[in-house]
Amino acid sequence: MNKTIKSEVRKLLFCMISKYEEKKLVKQAVLREKQDCLRTVTVFLDSLEDNARTAEVKQAIKKITDLDQKDMMKSQNQYLEELSSLTDVSVITLKRIKKEGAVNEGVWRTPGKKRPHPSKVSNLDSFDMDVIRNKINEFYIVRKQVPTLRSLLVELKESIEFGGCRETLRRILLANGYVFKKNKNERSLLIERYDIAAWRHRFLRTIASKRAEGKPIIYLDETYVHKTYKPKKCWQGPSTSGIVENISSGKRYIIVHAGSEKGPVPNSLLVFSTKSKMADYHHDMNSTNFNKWLQEKLIPNLNEPYVIVMDNASYHSVIINKAPTSQNRKLEIQNWLTLNGISFETYNSKAELLCLVNQNTPEPIYEADELLSLNGHEVLRLPPYHCDLNAIELIWSLAKRNVGSKNVSRTPKEFEDLIKQSFECITADDWKKMTDHVIHVEDKYKRRDNITENNLESFIINLRDSSDSSDSDDSLHVEFLHSDFDYSD
C-alpha cells in the first residue's frame, strides 16, 4: 500500500533537492570553464607536429573530460540515494517530487483518500431542505419535544426517503445554519434590554463611587428552604440505602438576612415557617413583615450609615406617594390633582385627568427607602434580573449546602435550629470572599459594557414603569426565584 506523503514534507524534500540542483549548476559552470581550457590546449596541440608525446597529452585531456562527466552523474544519483536512506523515501519518489515541484508553481497539496462510493444524499433540493426545517419546527411547536438526530432521521426516512446516516444529517444541519449548543437563558435576553442595561450602568457607577468614598455596603435579601431539602446524590451500598428523597416538599422556611464584607449583621437573621404550597416564596412575604424586620432586626444593629443593596421585589417597593390610576374614581383623581397643586377644568373627562396625572407624576418614594433614609442609610436598588450582583445570593448557596448535608431525620424544631446553625458556620472570611467575587462580577460587566469610572452620576431609581407595589396594577412586577449560582470565570 502506497504511503501518502503530506504536502509540507514533500515541500521540504523538494527544497533539499533544489539546493543540490543549485550547487550542481555552479559545479557545471566550473566544469565548462575547465573544459574550455582543455579544449584550448587541445587546439594548440593540434597545431604542433604529430608525435608520440603530443598524442599522449591529447589522450590524457580526453580522459579528464570523461571523468568529470561521470563524476557529475555519480554525484546526483549518490545524493538522491543518501537522501532516500535518511528519509525512508525511495529514489523514484524523490524524482517524482522533483518533477512535481517543477510544475506546481510552489503550491503543494496533500492528495485526499479516494472514496469510490457515491454520496447517498447528493440529490437534496430546496424542497427537501424545507421538509427538514418543517420537521424540526414540528417537534418544537406541535409535538412539544426536543428533536434529536436519531428521532429526526427516522422521520426523514419516512417523509423524503433520506438515505444518509446520522453523521450525514448532522453535517447537513450544520451546513444550513443549525448549531447544537447550550440553550439561551431568558435572563440573558432580558438583561440586554436597553432600559435594564442603562439601570445596570448607573448601578455599577454608583456602587463604585460609594466604595471610593469609603461607605460600607450591606446586602440583604430573602430566600427559602424546604424541610425535605437534601443533596441529590449520596454514597450508597449493599447494606446502606443512604438518604431517601421525600415525595412531598414539606413545610417551607423563609429566611431573611443581611451582611457585608465584614460578616453578617448581628442578630439580623430571621427564619419562619409557612404552610404555603405556592412555587414562588414571595407570596409568603409582604411589606408589613419586611418593614417589621427592618425596624426590629436590621436597623437597630447598624452602628453607622450604610449603603443598603436590595432588589425590587413588590414588598420592597411599596410606594408612599402613589399616583391614581384608571382604577380610581374620577373624584379621587381630582382630589389628587388638587392636593398636588395641578390645575384642571371641572368638565375634563377622566381620561383627560389621567393624562394630567401621567404628566405630573412625581418620583416614587418607597416605604422601605424612607424608613432606612430616616435612620441615616441609603438604598441602592439592583437592576432587574441581576441577582449575580448581590453577594448574599452566594451566602444562600453555602447555607443550603450546609443544611442539605446534615438534614437526616430532623424534626421541624431541629430543622429550624439547623438552618440557624448553618448560617453561624459561615464566617466573616466567607462573606469577604463573596463580596470580593461580586466586585469581580461588577468588573466583568464594566469591561463588557465599556463603563469607566469617570463622570459618576447619582443613581436615581424610577420604578414607575419597571417595578411593582403591593397594591398597584399598572406597573411591571419585577421579581424572580432565587437559586444557587455558579459564577466561575
Image (tube, rainbow, N blue to C red):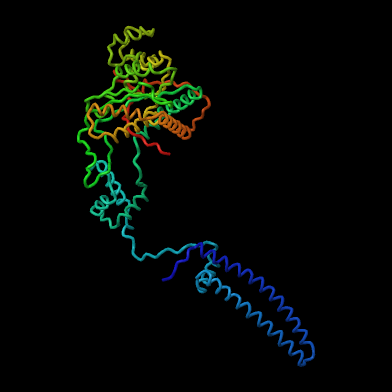
Residue drawn 66% across and 82% down? Answer: 67
Whether residue 392 sits left or right of residue 232 in the image: it is: right
Quadrant where the image shows the C terminus: top left
Q: Residue furthest right?
A: 48
Q: Nearer the viewer, residue 208 or 459?
A: 208
In the image, residue 59 sits, relative to residue 79, either above or below, namely: below
Res 264 → quadrant: top left
Instruction: Evaluate whether residue 373 shows in this view.
Output: yes
Residue 386, horizontal then vertical, whole percent: 38, 30
Instruction: Evaluate whether residue 364 shows in this view.
Output: no
Residue 65, horizontal then vertical, whole percent: 68, 82
Q: Nearer the viewer, residue 408 or 72?
A: 408
In the image, residue 129 sits, relative to residue 33, either above or below, namely: above
Residue drawn 31% across and 60% down? Answer: 120
Whether residue 403 sits left or right of residue 195 in the image: it is: left
Residue drawn 77% across and 90% down? Answer: 53
Q: Nearer the viewer, residue 253 or 58?
A: 253
Res 421 → quadrant: top left
Residue 315, horizontal then vertical, whole percent: 32, 20
Res 251 → quadrant: top left
Residue 142, horizontal then vertical, whole percent: 23, 42
